[in-house]
Protein backbone atom coordinates (compact mmCIF):
# COMPACT_ATOMS: atom_id res chain seq x y z
CA UNK A 1 0.00 0.00 0.00
CA UNK A 2 1.27 3.46 -0.88
CA UNK A 3 1.01 5.39 2.40
CA UNK A 4 1.83 8.66 0.66
CA UNK A 5 -1.55 8.62 -1.06
CA UNK A 6 -3.58 8.00 2.09
CA UNK A 7 -5.63 10.80 3.61
CA UNK A 8 -6.05 10.10 7.31
CA UNK A 9 -9.24 11.56 8.86
CA UNK A 10 -7.68 12.34 12.21
CA UNK A 11 -7.13 15.68 13.87
CA UNK A 12 -4.59 14.81 16.48
CA UNK A 13 -1.05 13.55 16.20
CA UNK A 14 -0.50 9.97 17.22
CA UNK A 15 1.97 8.41 19.59
CA UNK A 16 5.34 6.75 19.07
CA UNK A 17 6.43 5.45 15.67
CA UNK A 18 5.40 1.84 16.39
CA UNK A 19 2.13 2.82 18.08
CA UNK A 20 1.39 5.19 15.23
CA UNK A 21 1.20 2.42 12.64
CA UNK A 22 -0.98 0.13 14.76
CA UNK A 23 -3.43 2.85 15.78
CA UNK A 24 -3.76 4.26 12.28
CA UNK A 25 -4.57 0.82 10.88
CA UNK A 26 -7.53 0.81 13.24
CA UNK A 27 -8.43 4.36 12.25
CA UNK A 28 -8.34 3.48 8.57
CA UNK A 29 -10.83 0.69 9.16
CA UNK A 30 -13.17 2.63 11.41
CA UNK A 31 -12.64 6.17 10.07
CA UNK A 32 -12.43 7.64 13.57
CA UNK A 33 -12.37 11.40 13.88
CA UNK A 34 -10.98 13.24 16.87
CA UNK A 35 -11.80 16.81 17.84
CA UNK A 36 -9.46 18.61 20.25
CA UNK A 37 -10.89 21.52 22.26
CA UNK A 38 -10.02 23.56 25.33
CA UNK A 39 -9.75 27.11 26.59
CA UNK A 40 -6.78 29.40 26.11
CA UNK A 41 -3.71 28.49 28.11
CA UNK A 42 -4.55 24.88 29.06
CA UNK A 43 -1.78 23.45 26.87
CA UNK A 44 -3.57 21.95 23.84
CA UNK A 45 -0.74 22.34 21.34
CA UNK A 46 1.90 21.11 23.77
CA UNK A 47 -0.33 18.15 24.64
CA UNK A 48 -0.33 17.15 20.97
CA UNK A 49 3.43 17.50 20.74
CA UNK A 50 3.95 15.39 23.85
CA UNK A 51 2.10 12.42 22.37
CA UNK A 52 4.86 11.78 19.84
CA UNK A 53 7.86 13.14 21.74
CA UNK A 54 9.27 12.18 25.11
CA UNK A 55 10.73 15.65 25.62
CA UNK A 56 8.95 18.81 24.50
CA UNK A 57 9.89 22.45 24.81
CA UNK A 58 7.55 25.01 26.40
CA UNK A 59 5.72 27.29 23.98
CA UNK A 60 6.27 31.02 24.63
CA UNK A 61 3.10 32.68 25.92
CA UNK A 62 3.26 35.16 23.05
CA UNK A 63 3.10 32.36 20.46
CA UNK A 64 -0.13 30.64 21.48
CA UNK A 65 -2.70 29.47 18.93
CA UNK A 66 -4.87 32.40 17.84
CA UNK A 67 -6.77 30.82 14.94
CA UNK A 68 -7.86 27.40 13.77
CA UNK A 69 -4.83 25.72 12.23
CA UNK A 70 -5.02 22.90 9.75
CA UNK A 71 -1.57 21.52 9.16
CA UNK A 72 -0.54 18.54 7.04
CA UNK A 73 2.25 16.50 8.59
CA UNK A 74 4.05 13.32 7.69
CA UNK A 75 6.28 10.76 9.30
CA UNK A 76 8.29 8.01 7.65
CA UNK A 77 5.14 5.96 7.08
CA UNK A 78 2.06 8.17 6.81
CA UNK A 79 0.57 11.58 6.26
CA UNK A 80 -1.96 13.03 8.68
CA UNK A 81 -3.89 16.21 9.37
CA UNK A 82 -3.75 18.22 12.58
CA UNK A 83 -6.51 20.63 13.58
CA UNK A 84 -5.67 22.77 16.60
CA UNK A 85 -8.47 25.08 17.76
CA UNK A 86 -7.80 28.38 19.54
CA UNK A 87 -8.83 28.71 23.15
CA UNK A 88 -10.58 32.07 22.94
CA UNK A 89 -14.30 32.60 22.44
CA UNK A 90 -15.45 29.57 20.49
CA UNK A 91 -18.75 30.59 18.87
CA UNK A 92 -17.10 31.36 15.53
CA UNK A 93 -15.64 27.84 15.41
CA UNK A 94 -19.08 26.31 14.90
CA UNK A 95 -19.31 27.79 11.39
CA UNK A 96 -15.69 27.24 10.48
CA UNK A 97 -15.32 25.32 7.22
CA UNK A 98 -12.20 23.62 8.59
CA UNK A 99 -14.26 22.08 11.38
CA UNK A 100 -17.39 21.23 9.38
CA UNK A 101 -15.34 19.71 6.56
CA UNK A 102 -13.53 17.50 9.03
CA UNK A 103 -16.46 16.36 11.17
CA UNK A 104 -18.39 14.82 8.28
CA UNK A 105 -19.90 12.01 10.30
CA UNK A 106 -21.45 11.73 13.72
CA UNK A 107 -19.91 9.94 16.64
CA UNK A 108 -16.36 11.32 16.67
CA UNK A 109 -14.19 11.22 19.77
CA UNK A 110 -13.88 14.58 21.55
CA UNK A 111 -10.87 15.42 23.70
CA UNK A 112 -11.31 18.48 25.87
CA UNK A 113 -8.12 19.69 27.55
CA UNK A 114 -8.54 21.19 31.03
CA UNK A 115 -5.99 22.30 33.62
CA UNK A 116 -7.91 22.89 36.87
CA UNK A 117 -7.56 26.65 36.47
CA UNK A 118 -3.84 26.71 35.75
CA UNK A 119 -4.24 28.62 32.50
CA UNK A 120 -1.14 30.42 31.30
CA UNK A 121 -1.11 33.01 28.52
CA UNK A 122 0.32 36.42 27.69
CA UNK A 123 -0.14 38.89 30.58
CA UNK A 124 1.67 42.04 31.62
CA UNK A 125 4.08 41.81 34.55
CA UNK A 126 1.66 43.94 36.55
CA UNK A 127 -1.26 41.58 35.91
CA UNK A 128 0.87 38.55 36.71
CA UNK A 129 1.91 40.11 40.01
CA UNK A 130 -1.55 41.36 40.98
CA UNK A 131 -3.87 38.70 39.56
CA UNK A 132 -1.99 35.41 39.27
CA UNK A 133 -0.16 35.33 42.59
CA UNK A 134 -1.13 36.01 46.18
CA UNK A 135 -0.68 39.59 47.34
CA UNK A 136 1.12 38.34 50.46
CA UNK A 137 3.33 35.66 48.89
CA UNK A 138 4.47 35.80 45.26
CA UNK A 139 5.20 32.06 45.33
CA UNK A 140 1.55 31.14 45.99
CA UNK A 141 -1.10 31.10 43.26
CA UNK A 142 -4.11 33.33 43.89
CA UNK A 143 -7.11 31.05 44.47
CA UNK A 144 -9.40 33.54 42.74
CA UNK A 145 -7.30 33.21 39.58
CA UNK A 146 -7.76 29.42 39.61
CA UNK A 147 -11.48 29.67 40.36
CA UNK A 148 -11.96 32.22 37.57
CA UNK A 149 -10.34 29.97 35.00
CA UNK A 150 -12.17 26.85 36.15
CA UNK A 151 -15.36 28.85 35.59
CA UNK A 152 -14.07 29.81 32.15
CA UNK A 153 -13.55 26.13 31.30
CA UNK A 154 -17.15 25.49 32.33
CA UNK A 155 -18.54 28.38 30.27
CA UNK A 156 -16.62 27.33 27.17
CA UNK A 157 -17.97 23.81 27.58
CA UNK A 158 -21.48 25.27 27.67
CA UNK A 159 -20.74 27.18 24.45
CA UNK A 160 -19.77 23.92 22.75
CA UNK A 161 -22.64 21.95 24.27
CA UNK A 162 -25.10 22.34 21.36
CA UNK A 163 -22.37 21.44 18.90
CA UNK A 164 -21.52 18.32 20.91
CA UNK A 165 -25.18 17.30 20.86
CA UNK A 166 -25.23 17.65 17.06
CA UNK A 167 -22.12 15.56 16.41
CA UNK A 168 -23.03 13.12 19.20
CA UNK A 169 -19.50 12.06 20.21
CA UNK A 170 -19.12 8.40 21.07
CA UNK A 171 -16.63 9.33 23.77
CA UNK A 172 -15.87 12.60 25.52
CA UNK A 173 -12.42 12.50 27.06
CA UNK A 174 -11.52 15.18 29.58
CA UNK A 175 -7.74 15.33 29.78
CA UNK A 176 -6.79 17.12 33.01
CA UNK A 177 -3.44 18.52 31.95
CA UNK A 178 -0.64 20.18 33.96
CA UNK A 179 -0.63 17.56 36.72
CA UNK A 180 2.71 18.92 37.91
CA UNK A 181 0.88 22.05 39.12
CA UNK A 182 -2.20 20.57 40.84
CA UNK A 183 -0.74 17.20 41.94
CA UNK A 184 -0.99 17.99 45.66
CA UNK A 185 -4.73 18.63 45.17
CA UNK A 186 -5.34 15.54 43.03
CA UNK A 187 -8.36 14.24 44.95
CA UNK A 188 -10.16 17.60 44.87
CA UNK A 189 -9.29 17.97 41.20
CA UNK A 190 -10.74 14.59 40.25
CA UNK A 191 -13.84 15.22 42.33
CA UNK A 192 -14.49 18.46 40.45
CA UNK A 193 -14.19 16.97 36.96
CA UNK A 194 -15.94 13.69 37.72
CA UNK A 195 -18.74 14.82 40.04
CA UNK A 196 -18.69 18.62 40.33
CA UNK A 197 -20.10 21.47 38.27
CA UNK A 198 -18.04 20.54 35.21
CA UNK A 199 -19.39 16.99 35.18
CA UNK A 200 -23.03 18.12 35.28
CA UNK A 201 -22.88 19.15 31.62
CA UNK A 202 -22.58 15.52 30.56
CA UNK A 203 -25.99 14.66 31.94
CA UNK A 204 -27.40 16.14 28.72
CA UNK A 205 -24.97 14.19 26.52
CA UNK A 206 -26.61 10.88 27.29
CA UNK A 207 -25.28 9.07 24.23
CA UNK A 208 -21.67 9.98 25.01
CA UNK A 209 -19.45 8.19 27.46
CA UNK A 210 -17.35 10.53 29.60
CA UNK A 211 -13.97 9.67 31.05
CA UNK A 212 -11.37 11.79 32.89
CA UNK A 213 -7.69 11.09 32.29
CA UNK A 214 -4.81 12.76 34.14
CA UNK A 215 -1.91 14.10 32.12
CA UNK A 216 1.22 16.21 32.12
CA UNK A 217 2.77 17.37 28.85
CA UNK A 218 5.79 18.98 30.48
CA UNK A 219 7.06 19.73 33.99
CA UNK A 220 7.40 23.46 33.80
CA UNK A 221 7.28 26.67 35.78
CA UNK A 222 3.94 28.47 36.03
CA UNK A 223 4.50 32.11 35.06
CA UNK A 224 8.18 31.51 35.86
CA UNK A 225 7.48 30.14 39.37
CA UNK A 226 8.48 26.56 40.10
CA UNK A 227 5.50 24.35 41.09
CA UNK A 228 5.30 23.39 44.77
CA UNK A 229 4.48 19.71 44.30
CA UNK A 230 6.33 16.41 44.54
CA UNK A 231 5.40 15.51 40.94
CA UNK A 232 8.36 14.13 38.98
CA UNK A 233 9.32 12.57 35.64
CA UNK A 234 8.27 9.13 36.85
CA UNK A 235 4.77 10.41 37.56
CA UNK A 236 4.70 12.12 34.17
CA UNK A 237 5.69 8.92 32.36
CA UNK A 238 3.12 6.87 34.28
CA UNK A 239 0.32 9.30 33.38
CA UNK A 240 1.28 9.25 29.72
CA UNK A 241 1.32 5.44 29.63
CA UNK A 242 -2.06 5.33 31.34
CA UNK A 243 -3.52 7.83 28.88
CA UNK A 244 -2.11 5.94 25.90
CA UNK A 245 -3.60 2.66 27.10
CA UNK A 246 -7.07 4.14 27.64
CA UNK A 247 -6.99 6.13 24.41
CA UNK A 248 -6.08 3.11 22.31
CA UNK A 249 -8.86 1.07 23.90
CA UNK A 250 -11.39 3.81 23.05
CA UNK A 251 -10.21 4.06 19.44
CA UNK A 252 -10.44 0.32 18.97
CA UNK A 253 -14.06 0.09 20.16
Image (tube, rainbow, N blue to C red):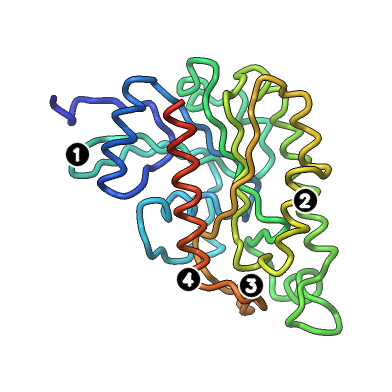
Up the image or down, 138 lies above or below 173; here it is below
Q: Residues within 10 Å of mark 3 (few under 14, many from 20)?
A: many
Up the image or down, 109 lies above or below 40; here it is above
> Which label's residue is closer to the chain start, 4 or 1?
1
> Which label's residue is closer to the chain start, 1 or 3?
1
Look at discs 4 and 3 and give the one toward the viewer: 4
User: Viewed as shown, does residue 77 lie left or right of 130?
Assistant: left
User: Viewed as shown, does residue 84 lie left or right of 23?
Assistant: right
**Residue at which label 1 appears:** 77
> Which label's residue is closer to the chain start, 2 or 1?
1
Please count the marks in the image: 4
Q: Position of residue 83 (x, y in %)?
A: 46, 37
In this rendered view, identify the residue nearer to me: 136 or 107. 107
SS under mark 2: helix
**Residue at which label 3 appears:** 223
**Residue at which label 2 appears:** 191
Do callouts 1 and 3 mark residues in contact (Cβ within 8 Å)? no
Q: Position of residue 191 (x, y in %)?
A: 77, 50
Residue 233 - label: 4
SS under mark 1: loop
Do callouts 2 and 3 mark residues in contact (Cβ within 8 Å)? no
Q: Quadrant of the image for the N terminus?
A: top left
SS under mark 3: loop
Give the CA distance from mark 2 to mark 3. 26 Å
Q: Residue at x 39, y 42 (%)?
A: 13
Do callouts 4 and 1 mark residues in contact (Cβ within 8 Å)? no
Q: Residue at x 48, y 27 (%)?
A: 98
> Which label's residue is closer to the chain start, 4 or 2?
2
> Which label's residue is closer to the chain start, 4 or 3?
3
Amino acid sequence: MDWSSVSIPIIIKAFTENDLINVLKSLLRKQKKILLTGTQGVGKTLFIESLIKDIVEPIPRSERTLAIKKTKKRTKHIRYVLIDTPGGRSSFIFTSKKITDLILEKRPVVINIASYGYHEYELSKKDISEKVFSSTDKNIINKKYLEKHRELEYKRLLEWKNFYQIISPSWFITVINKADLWWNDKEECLEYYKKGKYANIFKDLKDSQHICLLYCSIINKFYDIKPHTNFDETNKRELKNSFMKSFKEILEM
